[in-house]
Image (spheres, rainbow, N blue to C red):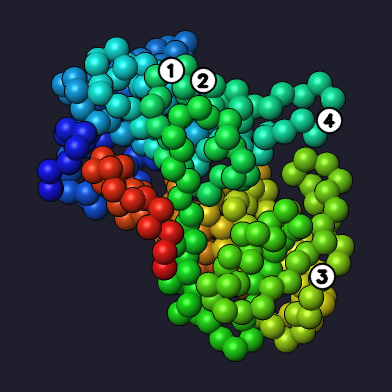
């Protein structure tokens, strides 16, 4: 590894997504830092760092996915342990930023939990955050420390280009996702349509109208995450009803909670392209409709560039 400005780079991982951490280390050709992480009988978390981190440039890899509270607390404890061990700089690598959907007061007397999580990370001793596809880009402003916001589009576009046809069309699942979908459509040089969605309650959605001509088109619904798959299934049905020939989807974060897998299996959606920001069970990995791409090279390259103080924004160029 070439000489850098910040001293030796040290990678540690919590228990949330150890496979991804291992892949990042392989890409960077570095050994993962040794830790002991275990639960006491009352489920309190115990952490011990078994490496000398004094003066090191430390990166902690931990998505705050399900169980979100446990994984978040584990990340905070690891950061505190590293800070008290005199690490020079601590970067929280959070491929999936939990609580990102609670980013504003949408009704009276509710919290802005994504801001609370940002405050907790900074208070614990985080010097920098590296994350992928925040639900709302404005969450970067909740931090008073640098945030490097990566886009999984860099991983997905090469894959989607192999599937490109003259009838391909990118679909935004709602008005809020138009910017993301437009970026995909521009890179792929295809047209864009929008699903007019009316949400009745949390985790429940009803697709109403399609804005754009999708007749006989191969549609790719682009979203940042799929949770219960209600939005995706409703959108697929609406697109088929409007005349679409095929419906596919791509998302960064495959949350896939509750009835998601059953809904996907029964729906008319042809395929889903996602990434490994969140660990997945074997039934999801082996699902015939789901293709998983790795963000390890993207994160690994970003970590190297942060450590060497070179441009991270150039990673956005395809």
Q: Secondary structure at mark 4?
A: loop
Does label 4 or label 1 sit earlier along the sequence?
4
**Which one is closest to the eye, mark 3 or mark 1?**
1
The label shown at residue 210 is 3
Percent across and percent down for residue 74 are 42, 23
Quarter-of-image position of residue 31:
top left
Q: Label 4 vs label 3: CA separation? A: 28 Å
Q: Are marks 4 and 1 in contact (CB under 8 Å)?
A: no
Q: Label 2 vs label 4: CA separation? A: 23 Å
- Residue beneath the point at 39% across and 37% down: 93
Does label 3 or label 1 sit earlier along the sequence?
1
Q: Are marks 3 and 1 in contact (CB under 8 Å)?
A: no
Q: Label 2 vs label 1: CA separation? A: 6 Å
Mark 1, other Cα within 10 Å: few <14 / some 14–19 / many ≥20: some
Front residue (pair 212, 239)? 212
The label shown at residue 74 is none
Left or right: 279 in relation to 205: left
Mark 2, other Cα within 10 Å: few <14 / some 14–19 / many ≥20: some
Residue wearing tag 4: 107
Q: Are marks 2 and 1 in contact (CB under 8 Å)?
A: yes
Residue wearing tag 2: 120
Residue wearing tag 1: 124
Percent across and percent down for residue 250 are 57, 63
Q: Are marks 4 and 3 in contact (CB under 8 Å)?
A: no
- Residue beneath the point at 36% across and 36% down: 61
């Amino acid at each position: 590894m070439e000489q850098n400005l910040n001293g030796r780079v040290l990678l540690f991982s919590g228990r949330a997504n150890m496979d991804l951490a291992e892949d990042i280390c392989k890409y960077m050709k570095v050994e993962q830092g040794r830790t002991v992480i275990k639960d006491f009988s009352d489920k309190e978390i115990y952490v011990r760092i078994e490496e000398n981190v004094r003066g090191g440039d430390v990166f902690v890899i931990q998505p705050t996915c399900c169980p979100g509270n446990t994984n978040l607390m584990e990340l905070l404890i690891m950061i505190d342990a590293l800070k008290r061990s005199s690490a020079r700089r601590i970067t929280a690598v959070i491929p999936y930023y939990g609580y990102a959907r609670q980013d504003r007061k949408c009704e009276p007397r509710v919290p802005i939990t994504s801001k609370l999580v940002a405050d907790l990370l900074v208070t614990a001793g985080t010097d920098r955050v590296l994350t992928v596809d925040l639900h709302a880009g404005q969450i970067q402003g909740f931090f008073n420390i640098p945030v490097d916001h990566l886009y999984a589009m860099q991983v997905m576009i090469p894959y989607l280009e192999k599937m490109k046809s003259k009838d391909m069309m990118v679909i935004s699942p709602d008005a809020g996702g138009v910017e993301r979908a437009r970026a995909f459509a521009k890179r792929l040089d295809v047209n864009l349509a929008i699903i007019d969605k009316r949400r009745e309650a949390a985790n429940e959605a009803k697709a109403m109208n399609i804005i754009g001509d999708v007749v006989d088109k191969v549609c790719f619904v682009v979203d940042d995450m799929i949770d219960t798959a209600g939005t995706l299934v409703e959108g697929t049905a609406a697109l088929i009803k409007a005349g679409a020939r095929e419906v596919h989807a791509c998302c960064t974060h495959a949350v896939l909670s509750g009835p998601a897998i059953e809904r996907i299996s029964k729906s008319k959606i042809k395929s889903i392209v996602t990434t490994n920001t969140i660990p997945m069970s074997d039934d999801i990995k082996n699902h015939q409709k789901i293709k998983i791409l790795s963000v390890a090279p993207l994160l690994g390259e970003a970590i190297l560039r942060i450590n060497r103080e070179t441009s991270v924004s150039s990673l956005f160029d395809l």
